[in-house]
Amino acid sequence: MQYDTFISTVRDSGELPDQSAADRAVRSTLRVLGSRLAGGMPGNLASQLPGDLGEALPATGGGERFDVDGFYDRVADDEGVPRADARRHARATLATIAVAVTDEEYAHLAAQLPGEYADLLQTDLVRHR
């Protein structure tokens, strides 16, 4: 998946006003995700993302422990939007990641997150252009 397609997909699925807002939402989500994932997972994920989106992820994750509500709160703070918007944007980002990376990579990502993250990992949100 190319960068423009990735960002457009998040924009449409996350109901964002434009490409710039979608890019900001994706990078905010990736920064928070990178702090939650452990080991080399963020670096592996970064290598499969289009354009320079992978730069929002650290090479090695710290494996911080916070629940899915904490995830959405952190995205909201980073992105500068209300929590409900951050939730929608983060879910759109993860749904787009699910179709942009290999099935194996996405399975590894999902395996690092506890069951309560199922809300974040729903993939039925992607609206293909």
Image (cartoon, rainbow, N blue to C red):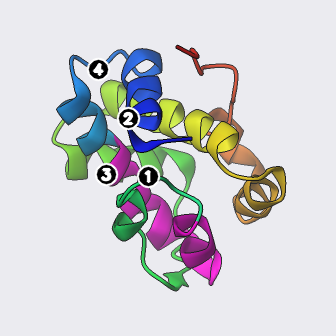
Q: Position of residue 44 (x, y in %)?
A: 62, 74
Q: Secondary structure at mark 2?
A: helix
The three-letter amino acid code for the residue at tag 1 is Gly
Residue underneath mark 4: 16
Residue underneath mark 2: 4
Q: In which quadrant is the N terminus drawn?
A: top right
Which comes before the other along the chain, label 2 or label 1?
Answer: 2
Q: Separation of disc 2 and disc 3 at Cα? A: 17 Å
Q: How many marks?
A: 4
Mark identifier at residue 70: 1
Q: Residues within 10 Å of mark 2 (few under 14, many from 20)?
A: few
Q: Separation of disc 3 and disc 1 at Cα? A: 14 Å
Residue underneath mark 3: 28
Give the foreground label among 2 and 1: 2
The answer to which image quadrant residue 123 occupies is top right
> Is residue 44 in sight in this rendering?
yes
Q: In screen coordinates, is 86 left or right of 118?
A: left
> Is residue 82 in sight in this rendering?
no
Taking 91 as reference, is 57 above or below it? below
Taking 66 as reference, is 20 above or below it? above
